């Protein structure tokens, strides 16, 4: 196991956010430690999952030296009329976390406060910007998000595309939102980026999609067969490893190359990837690639060829 790993995708609710969720009378809200949302069944949160000291200890056991925590976008906070209350609680709590952590900043999707985001991204505590995939489902949505994404690009900090709220669906098992809704959202956001030519739109922005972009890259052959154009690999476009194992990640790496894959565990919902394809690949996924994504080392433009 490579020591010194950077986990770009974790979740940890600071006390400020927990208390803000508990005083709400409509979704999303907490009653005790039971989470209520619009699109999913009530979920019993394990309090220890959001204990800061316990998380640091777990990370140290896994060889993780830096954990980047993000707001739980499936809660739908970013699109609420009163989003600013919860977002302020999130940012205040996240900024107060120990140095082991960095946080992804979040904004409202309807009227983002660009000056506030600029200030936050200037702080070392915030590693980049997170947007829910539900805000980026079409080429037009990427274009509409241009002003807020430009703030991140100018700050030299990346974007994390995370699954957003699931649709309310009756008579489905508990795993349905994560396996169906989240995957579909990420795939749509990935293809919308391709369709709008996101690199031309935002030439300086590094982007990482959670959960291997719902395996969207594996469908590039179908994209070409159906009339899409082949493009070179984008060295500033990444996917994280959360939610998948070696078989799925092998398929993604065959399309994008090993340099595009970064460690993202989605902890506390899963453990971080400890090994993948041998020592060299493991070191790249757990250490080198996340550092490059986050701008923690001199950014290197790699020639990774084109997709097969």
Image (tube, grey):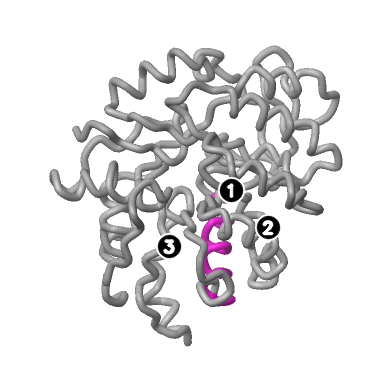
Left or right of residue 191: residue 62: left
> Residue 255 in the image: x percent, y percent?
31, 67
**Point 47% across, 59% down: residue:** 206
Q: Main secondary structure of the magenta part?
A: helix
SS of the residue under disc 1: strand
**Point 57% across, 62% down: residue:** 189
User: What separation in Å lies between label 2 and label 1 (alpha carbons)?
Assistant: 9 Å
Q: Which mark is residue 174?
A: none
- Crowding at dot 3, Cα within 10 Å, few <14 / some 14-19 / many 20+, comes out as many
> Residue 211 in the image: x percent, y percent?
45, 48
Nearer-the-camera pick, 152 or 33: 152
Q: Which mark is residue 129?
A: 1
Where's the C terminus, which quadrant?
bottom left
- Please tell me in which quadrant of the rendered image residue 34 appears: top right
Left or right of residue 79: residue 50: left
User: What separation in Å lies between label 2 and label 3 (alpha carbons)?
Assistant: 18 Å
Q: Given this view, does label 2 or label 3 mark the residue nearer the observer? A: 2
**Point 69% across, 20% down: residue:** 16
Left or right of residue 225: residue 62: left
Residue 182 lies within the magenta run:
yes
SS of the residue under disc 3: strand
User: What separation in Å lies between label 3 and label 1 (alpha carbons)?
Assistant: 15 Å
First of labels 2, 1 by sequence position? 1
- CB of mark 2 within 8 Å of CB of mark 1? yes
Q: Which residues are magenta?
A: 181-197
Where is mark 3, residue-wise? 237
> Residue 131 in the image: x percent, y percent?
62, 50
**Point 64% across, 72% down: residue:** 139
- CB of mark 3 within 8 Å of CB of mark 1? no
- Crowding at dot 1, Cα within 10 Å, few <14 / some 14-19 / many 20+, comes out as many
Where is mark 2, residue-wise? 148
Q: Is residue 134 above or below residue 3?
A: below
């Amino acid at each position: 196991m490579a020591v010194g790993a950077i986990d770009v995708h974790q979740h940890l609710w600071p006390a400020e956010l927990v208390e803000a969720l508990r005083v709400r009378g409509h979704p999303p809200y907490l009653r005790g430690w039971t989470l209520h949302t619009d699109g999913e069944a009530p979920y019993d949160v394990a309090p220890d999952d959001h204990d800061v000291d316990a998380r640091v200890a777990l990370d140290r056991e896994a060889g993780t030296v830096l954990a980047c925590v993000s707001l739980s976008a499936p809660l739908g906070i970013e699109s609420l009329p009163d989003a600013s209350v919860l977002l302020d609680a999130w940012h205040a709590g996240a900024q107060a976390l120990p140095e082991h952590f960095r946080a992804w900043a979040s904004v409202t999707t309807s009227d983002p406060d660009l000056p506030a985001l600029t200030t936050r991204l200037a702080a070392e505590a915030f590693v980049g910007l997170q947007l829910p995939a539900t805000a980026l489902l079409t080429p037009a949505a990427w274009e509409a998000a241009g002003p807020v994404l430009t703030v991140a690009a100018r700050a030299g900090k990346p974007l994390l595309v995370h699954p957003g709220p699931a649709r309310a669906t009756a008579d489905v098992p508990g795993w349905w939102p994560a396996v169906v809704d989240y995957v579909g959202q990420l795939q749509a956001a990935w293809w919308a980026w391709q369709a709008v030519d996101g690199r031309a739109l935002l030439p300086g922005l590094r982007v990482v999609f959670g959960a291997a972009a719902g395996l969207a890259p594996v469908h590039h052959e179908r994209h070409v067969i159906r009339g899409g154009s082949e493009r070179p690999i984008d060295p500033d476009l990444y996917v994280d490893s959360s939610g998948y194992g070696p078989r799925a990640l092998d398929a993604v790496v065959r399309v994008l190359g090993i340099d595009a894959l970064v460690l993202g565990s989605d902890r506390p919902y899963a453990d971080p990837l400890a090994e993948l394809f041998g020592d060299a690949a493991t070191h790249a996924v757990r250490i080198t690639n996340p550092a490059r994504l986050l701008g923690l080392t001199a950014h290197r433009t790699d020639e990774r060829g084109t997709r097969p």
